[in-house]
Amino acid sequence: MNKNPILMLIMVVVMAVIPLENKAKVWSAKNIPMAHLKNKNCYVSDPDGIMNAAGRHRADSILRKLDKECKIESAFIIVNNVEGGDPFRMAQDVGNKYGVGKKATNRGLVVVIAVKDKKYFIAPGEGLEKDLTDAECDKIARACIVANMRENKPGGAVVSTAKAIYSKLKTGDSGIEDGEDDEDYTAFYVVVGLFVLFVIIIARVDVSGGGSSSGSSSSGGGSYGGGSFGGGGSGGSW
C-alpha cells in the first residue's frame, strides 16, 4: 500500500506535539518568573495567563500602594500547578529565595494560588505575622480566594485578596465581615465544565514575562530587600 509521505510526516509531527501541549507546566521557586524583578510596577506573576490584563493591572495598582504606603513588599503568584501540589512550600521558598520584604523588618508577603491544584497559601513574612495573623489570613482567604475560585473568578480572587490585605494593613480592618465566607457550592459545580474549557484555551496562549500588566514600558526591574519567612499564614483548598 502506497501512502502519501507528506501526510505521514504531518501525522508523526502532530502525534509528537500533542503530548507536549497536554503536559502542564509545574511551577516552583526555581522557575517562576518574578514579575516585580522585571518591572518595578508589577507584583503579580501569572505565567500561565490565567488573569486578563485589566485584572493584573488592578491588582498591581493595589499592591503598589501596599508597597509605597505600608512598606510591604509582596509577590502574588497565580499558576495552574505548583511543584508537589504544595502552595505553602512554594510560598516559603519564593519568599526566602528572593528575600521578599525589607531585611530590617521582614514585612514581606507572598500569596500563591494554584488553580488546577485547587489550593492556595497566604504567607506573611516573619515581621508581618503580628499584624497579619494566621486567623486573619484564613478569614481573608476564605472570603476572597475560596469564594471567587468556587465561581471560577481567578482575577477576582487575586484583586479582592490584594484589596483586603491592603485595607487590613492600612486601616486595621480588612473590610470582611465575620461569616462572609459561607458560600454555596452550587455555583462551582455549574461552571466546572466551562472552567475546564477555559483552562484548555488559555493554556495554549504563550504569556511571557510573568504576565505583567500595563506598567510603563520604560520602567526598569524592581528588587526585594532580603526578607525572610518562618511558616506563618494560612492555606487550604476550594
Image (cartoon, rainbow, N blue to C red):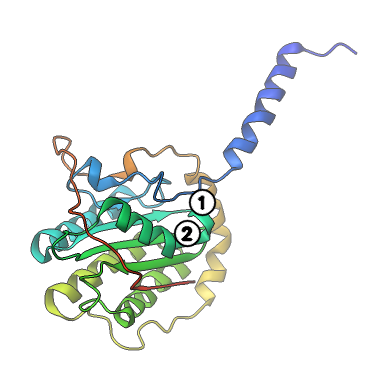
- The crowd level at tag 2 (other Cα within 10 Å; few <14, some 14-19, many 20+) is many
Q: Residue at x 59, y 43 (%)?
A: 23
Towards the viewer: 147 or 227: 227
Q: Position of residue 148 (x, y in %)?
A: 40, 69
> Is residue 4 rendered to the left or right of residue 228?
right
Marker disc for residue 199? 1
Instruction: Tell me the distance, in whole angstroms, between the alpha carbons under discs 1 and 2.
Output: 9 Å
Residue displayed at 35% across by 44% down: 33
**Type of the residue with mark 1:** Val
Relative to residue 212, is residue 9 drawn left or right?
right
- Dot 2 corresponds to which residue? 115
Q: Position of residue 131 (x, y in %)?
A: 20, 78
Taking the spot 32% from the left edge, 88% from the top edge, the residue there is: 178
Task: Judge whether residue 104 can be spotted in this image.
Answer: yes
Q: Which amino acid, mark 2?
A: Val
Secondary structure under the numbered disc 2 in the rendered image: loop
Residue drawn at (55%, 52%), measured in percent from left and top? Answer: 197
